[in-house]
Image: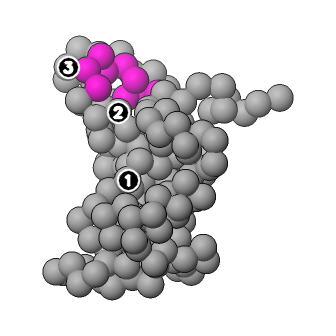
Amino acid sequence: MPRPHEIEFRMRNSRDEIPGVRKQGQRTWFANAARGMGFNTQDAIAGARRAIARINHGRWLADCPYCDGAELVHPDERFFVCLSCGNLGLGSPNKLDGDGRILHVEFPPNWHSIERILISRPDEVTRNWNPGETMADLRRENTEHGLENRS
């Protein structure tokens, strides 16, 4: 039996927006795309370094720790390859240099609950969540705008 989140994702994600990801998977499609752009992206997974998931305008994204890029991500395929730098960094100011290895994406443990609250917002532009925001913060924002809070 499918898990509840396999039935319907509420926030848009890489599978919704990029047909190749549905066919090849997050890790393979993004790594191949980065290599196709000339980056020396590796198939190996980086150890401790992570990309952190957030929701922006109703889409799951993760910011690159090596440059100012961000990419669509998926809660069931927690891999990140930046198409701006290929996880290499390339000397971006105030950022770390990467080694081209694929990163794991860290999602909040309660991501299902976050989605349920944000889906109450009729305008996708207002469907935002950043690490550090609590469920209470999101519920309060909904209440302030006269929206229901799904839990």
* Relative to 127, residue 101 above or below: below
Q: Position of residue 103 (x, y in %)?
A: 51, 69
- Front residue (pair 13, 31): 31
Which of label 1 and label 3 is nearer to you? Answer: 1
Residue 117 highlighted magenta (yes or no):
yes
> Mark 1 vs mark 3: which is more N-terminal?
1
Asked if labels 3 and 1 touch by Cβ distance under 8 angstroms, the answer is no
Q: Which mark is residue 58?
A: 2
- Whether residue 151 is visible, yes or no, is yes
Asked if labels 2 and 1 touch by Cβ distance under 8 angstroms, the answer is no
Task: Give the labeled residue for mark 3.
Answer: 145
- Whether residue 81 is visible, yes or no, is no
Q: Which mark is residue 71?
A: 1
- The kind of residue on which mark 1 rests is Glu
* Relative to 15, residue 121 above or below: above
> Mark 3 vs mark 2: which is more N-terminal?
2
Q: Give the extent of the magenta segment.
A: 116-124
Alpha carbon distance from label 1 to label 2: 13 Å
Which of label 1 and label 2 is nearer to you? Answer: 1
- The kind of residue on which mark 3 rests is His
Alpha carbon distance from label 3 to label 2: 17 Å
